[in-house]
Image (spheres, coloured by chain):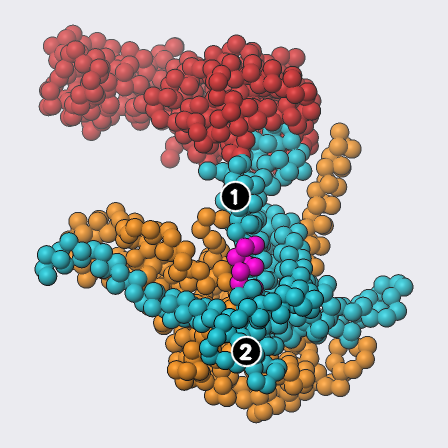
Amino acid sequence: MTDVMIEFRDVCKRYGTLVANDHLSLAIRKGELMTLLGPSGCGKTTALRCLTGYIRPDEGRIFIDGQDITDVPTHQRELGMVFQNFALFPHMTVQDNVGFPLMIRSLSTTERAERVAQALRLVRLEGYESHYPRQLSGGQQQRVGLARALVYRPKVLLLDEPLSNLDAKLREEMRFEIKEVVTRLEITAVYVTHDQAEALALSDRVAIMNRGRLEQVGTPEEIYEHPRSRFVAEFIGLSNFLEGHVQAVDGDIMVVSVGGLQMRIPALPNAGQGQRVLLFLRPNEVELLRPDDPGGANVFDAQVEKATYLGDTMDYRLTFGQDMTLRVQSDAQRRFGQGAPVRIRFPRVRCWAMTSG
Amino acid sequence: MTGFWRTHSSRLITLFLLLPALVGFFGLFFYPMLLTVILSFRPEGQAIGWTLENYTRFLADPDGRWVILLTFILSLGGTALSVLLSVPLALILREKVRGHRFYRLMVLVPLVVPGLIGALGLLLFWGTRGWFNLFLLQFVPFVERPVAVNYTIHGLILFYVWLYFPYTCITTLSSLESLDRSIEEAGEVSGATRWQVLRYIVLPLITPGILAGSVLTFMAAFGAFSVPLIAGGNYRPLAVEIYKQIAVPIPARWSAASAIAIIMGVLQVIFLSLYMRFVRRGGGTGGPS
Amino acid sequence: MRLARAYGRAMWDARLILAYTLLLSLTLFILAPFLMIALRSVGKGWFGRLWLPPQLTLDWYRWAVEVGNIPEVMKNTLIIGVIAVAVSTAIGIFAGWAFGRRQMPGKEVLMAIILLPRMIPPITYALGVAKIFYTLELVDTYLGVALAHVSVCAPYAILVLSATFEGLDERVLEAAGVCGANTVKRFFYVVLPLIMPGILASMIFSFTHSYNEFTLTLLTYGPHTVTLPVRTYLAVGDGYWEITSAMAMLMVVPSLLILAVIQRRAKPEKLVGGFKGV
């Protein structure tokens, strides 16, 4: 337990009837970059605000480094935070912005200057000390924000959608920069975003939230490859979903009837005959074969309904079985035209049991 | 002619659009001002001749200089108190406390109600028989005689605050509300207490707004006429002094009144330009954008 | 830990108490004068150290209406207000369009000059206005008093309306044009709804200024054009506080109506009309 830096213990926050955090429990390890990922309104920002102390949870406790900080005022929590809209002090120079946390902590002028210079070096902004925020580009402003958050070596760095106000190209650049700085300083970081690509690229672990609840916590690989719910699968990457019911269970394998076709897939625990299940496939995990390729298990005939050229990939909408559609992305080297017959093979299918209705 | 129209039509349309405003400006402001200036240099009651006597008489008279001083005391005192009242008030109203809509509306009351009615109510409330003195006499120990508020300098300043603080308050509030809250959050996360956030972040950022509002309050207070007229008693600031010159003596002393009016206008313009220069220097170096 | 929590709670409570004390004192400071007027206007035999009048009466209102001639005065005030609003709004629409949407050399300077009356105490030019109106025989006419008010109202109208027109999005007009609307239709269906709030705000504010205008009225009024503020001033001079209070109560009603409209329709910042460049 000693390696836990931040812990949410049963945190609840309600706004009237709206539940922003519903019994949120989450432990973040020391030196880890944890991303809170979810659509807007999922409660990730509320969770972050509970951490900063800007919002007080209705129930539950929050711990930082083993200390209960639920009732500690914001300014005593020793946090560093980077904001979506940068939140730099517009009336102060870069030097004063970055030096502000040090001034508040009454550091001597010389030590302050030294640490500010060090922080600005870290974010590669040397030479901008006397600029005002309005004279800087968005990317530079966000670097100042990062330097200000790190200058007093906080225990925890919070990042609230820090890249969403930057343009696409800069965003990717900054992504690596943040990752590098955080790794180099071995600081615990909580990163809030709604951008799944960002979350996958940056995080040690991702916590996916939906309607105030935690859907799944895991490494980017776990989240992408083994989503534990339809919501997670849909939120991370493109997904196809097919509904069916279990026809037979044979050890590790079960046969599922989907739109008149039989698929053999790994069995769900406690699966019984007749149970309704939901199959999930990534569009790039479906193998596209020529119509004359040999059949086999999980190989079906299909027809191209629509083909879209995306440069490095082709994006197809296929119909197969009884009125089922499937989105498939494949290499652009081999192309099929609209209306062309094809064969598809599902090498990896995952499924969840559904409650009826 | 058509060629002329084609090349100049755009300018002519602009001129045509501005015409009513220009006519109004010249007829109702510029020409009256000019007339006042001319009148101020005429010997009293005469339509010809030039003299500086109207000015020298007022400025040389200790009473005249007192009137000028009094006007500044009242308007600057009122402005300073308005700022002291408005800043905390705006900080509270920003938080959307319960009933904040009502309080916001209340701040507007002195602006829409005729000043004279306000003054009447103030005289009744602060008078020796008013609730203020009733409260003092009945609930505050060691107060045995009513405290004089009406017809005193501090009373007038108080009335000025009632009448003119909304200018400062509304301007301060609107500049506070245009502040990005996450800036303050950033300050707090950085380790600053609420007071430090207020001192180092919020106040510097809203200073231009406070100063702009206080300019409006100052101008209204400097030109105040109706309220000191009925509630000033023996304390007559410039505007009242001007009116007395044409209302009391028979025949009316138009030239003397005009001279004082010009002195008043010049003083206000000088003071305002100094003030704005100060605002630009003080608020401009650090202000946003 | 518990101590820290209690400390935090106490600080929070102290701040709340302080805030509400301030709000309460402010409420008292602003509204008590009206309460006093209201009580005075219905009180009878209210002398000495009494918090409330011992007897109630409506006599003062009868006096206010009969002797104070309030209906007549109200009529004067409204007529003058309507003329002043009409003239200043017309001036404001034309000039506002020029300032807000047209290119011209020296626009800033010209605007500063036209708005100059706001910088000068009204009594300064009121003297000249009175002199001119005496020669033109405009004193003691509705038109005369209303025109005097225009010198105060028009700058506000110009300020509000040029901001409104400036804020009009060119792209919306273009979009309307692309949709096939002709100029007339474009004006009525697109431009007018967009500028209506601005025009309304300018009219409300002009009316408020005219309704409350005292300085210029005092120098241009006559027996036939007594307005409400002048009537109050004369009544205060007469020294009958009860009747004056009754009059004030009657006069404050339209102000409160205006206040309600402002609260619904307009931003209060516009009422004070900020300065460009401050």
* Image position, residue A215 (x, y; %): 47, 26
Magenta span: predominant SS is helix
Secondary structure state at the residue bearing disc 1: helix
User: In this rendering, would B117 be left or right of B38?
Assistant: right
Q: Residue furthest bottom?
A: C66
To which residue does mark 1 refer?
Answer: B280
Question: Residue type at mark 2?
Answer: Glu
- In the image, A140 versus B254, the foreground residue is B254
For the N terminus of chain C, the quadrant is top right
Q: What residue sits 36% from the left and 72% below the top? A: C86
* Image position, residue A327 (x, y; %): 24, 23
**What is the magenta range?**
B264-271
- In the image, C3 versus C48, the foreground residue is C48
| Residue B266 part of the magenta-drawn span | yes
Quadrant of residue A221 within the rendered picture: top left
* Chain letter for the part of the structure drawn in orange: C
User: In this rendering, would C203 be left or right of B67?
Assistant: left
Q: Kindly identify which numbered label has been placed on residue B44.
A: 2
Q: What residue sits 52% from the left and 22% below the top? A: A129
Question: Residue type at mark 1?
Answer: Arg
User: In this rendering, would C18 be left or right of B208?
Assistant: right
**Colour of chain B as rendered:** cyan
